[in-house]
Image (spheres, rainbow, N blue to C red):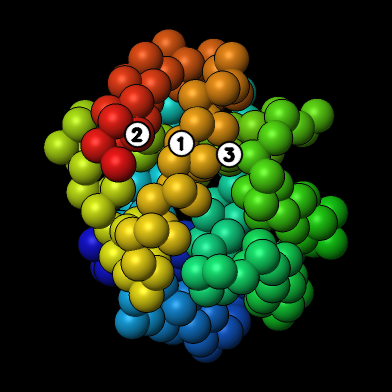
Amino acid sequence: MRQALFANWSSLCNKYSSDNECVIKQWNQIESAYTAAGRFYHNLQHLENMLGHLPLLTHQIDDADCIRFATFYHDFIYHTGKKDNEAKSAEVAEEAMHQLGIPLEQIKRCRNHIIATASHQESADEDTSCFLDLDLVVLGADWETYKRYAHNVRQEFKRYPDFIYKPGRRKVLRQFLEYEFIYKTQTFRERFESQAKLNLKQELNSL
């Protein structure tokens, strides 16, 4: 998995930079962040899953490179209980992309993608909507995969006892279920919407 992700990262960066040392340096920082202790779900597997589903949306994406950069950086900073993870991750992405010589317009767009994951609200930028769907693709996985996801999320919040964690988790699940649609793209609605709602209801009933 790490080799495949590094190959993906290298092919992306090599479009813009010939500084192989910088490319490897940035990758090492990404790998270190996503393999840190306590990363049970927001880890390299999450990135692989998102990038693996990206081809489903490429027909409607304007700038796939921005989405790939955003994928690698959107959970770079992740601390449970903090409300500025997305903003700080976006800052890391901006600095790294500057060093790699990415055009400013793409850096700004990547930042917007990352910041949007704080609320997962509908965006005027269709690419952002595609990115948000990729971030939530696990919700529409088969039940066994979803159960592992839910378990891993719980592990990331294990410092919180059930009487604190469960009400918060129920609130999150209900918010998703109150949406008319979880996914913003027609492609993902057709493929994953029904299963996602079944999964969310089943987890909610188990809490």
Question: In what quadrant of the picture does the C terminus appear?
Answer: top left
Give the Cα distance between marks 2 and 3: 22 Å
Give the mark, 2 or 3, whose residue is nearer the N terminus.
Answer: 3
Residue 196 horizontal/vertical position (percent):
37, 25
80 left or right, relative to 19: left
Q: Residue at x 39, y 69 (%)?
A: 160
In the rendered image, which residue does mark 2 sit on? 204
185 left or right, relative to 55: right
Instruction: In the rendered structure, find residue 132 and report the number of the disc placed on it.
Output: 3
200 left or right, relative to 146: right
Measured along the vertical axis of the image, is residue 38 above or below residue 187? below
Residue 106 horizontal/vertical position (percent):
76, 54
Name the image quarter holding residue 36.
bottom left
Q: Residue at x 24, y 62 (%)?
A: 1
Q: How many marks?
A: 3
Give the Cα distance between marks 1 and 3: 17 Å
- For discs 1 and 3, the disc positioned in front in the rendered view: 1
- For discs 2 and 3, the disc positioned in front in the rendered view: 2
Which of the pair 33/28 is nearer the observer?
33
Q: Is residue 171 shown to the viewer in this render?
A: yes
Instruction: Name the element at disc 2.
Output: helix
Which of the pair 99/197 is nearer the observer?
197
Name the image quarter holding residue 200.
top left
In the rendered image, which residue does mark 1 sit on? 173
